[in-house]
Image (cartoon, rainbow, N blue to C red):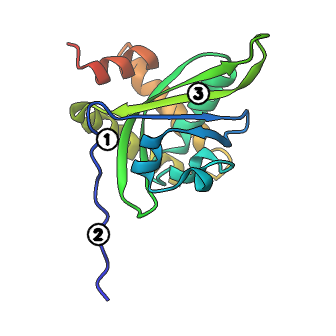
Amino acid sequence: MEQRMNREIKLAEDDLIVSKTDLKGTITYCNRTFMRISGYSSPELLGQPHNIVRHPDTPRGMFKLLWDTIQQGREYHGFVKNMNRDNDIYWCFCTVMPNYTATQELHGYFSVQRQARPEALDSMKEIYRQMITIEQRNNSAGAPAASLQWLTEYLADRQVEYDPFIIHLQKGEQ
């Protein structure tokens, strides 16, 4: 039997993948675009951890940064490599932000993923390769922190902080 090669799905410029999760990252809402691109139905997504679409090539250090950021009540921006039901991949530029109740209690998180700029992905793929290599060399528990430390040093060497660097990549500003 012939094995199918995984293909890369390119998001359209107007594709917006929207989801909400509870405080633990369990999906509580997903829009039709999320369902269409992921290949899962609403009943298959709701109640599942958001990492149902996470591709193993995304460094764990990036998810540590995401969780550290949003648990401090701040917005996170980044590039993620996702995998749909058929194991096809799709890259996104994502924004994840805290979702508060009317009484300002943290209720969960809101995520919007959109098309990532191809030139930005060229840079991020190399950064992710380095981070994954570091994670593979470190013990399981300390691997995310080790790769995140490398990223911090990489950015410091370039005299830039994470958020401006990521936004610059996505916008393509000189």
Foreground residue among 25 and 157:
25
**Is residue 38 in view from this perspective?**
yes
Position of the C terminus by quadrant: top left
Q: Position of residue 30 (x, y in %)?
A: 55, 40
Q: Is residue 126 left or right of residue 20?
A: left
Type of residue at label 1? Answer: Glu
Residue 146 found in image quarter: top right
With respect to residue 80, does 39 lie above or below?
Answer: below
Q: Residue at x 28, y 60 (%)?
A: 7
Foreground residue among 153 and 18:
18
Crowd tier of the residue under label 3, counting other residues whose Cα lies within 10 Å: few below 14, some 14–19, many 20 or above: many
Residue 126 is tagged as 1
Q: Residue at x 49, y 44 (%)?
A: 59
Foreground residue among 11 and 5:
11
Distance from the alpha carbon under mark 3 to that under mark 2: 32 Å
Distance from the alpha carbon under mark 3 to that under mark 1: 28 Å
**Is residue 161 in view from this perspective?**
no
Foreground residue among 136 and 85:
85
Residue 5 is tagged as 2
Distance from the alpha carbon under mark 1 to that under mark 2: 22 Å
Residue 81 found in image quarter: top left
Dot 3 falls on a residue whose secondary structure is: strand
Residue with the mark numbered 3: 110
Lower position in the chain sequence, tag 1 or tag 2:
2
Q: Position of residue 9 (x, y in %)?
A: 29, 50
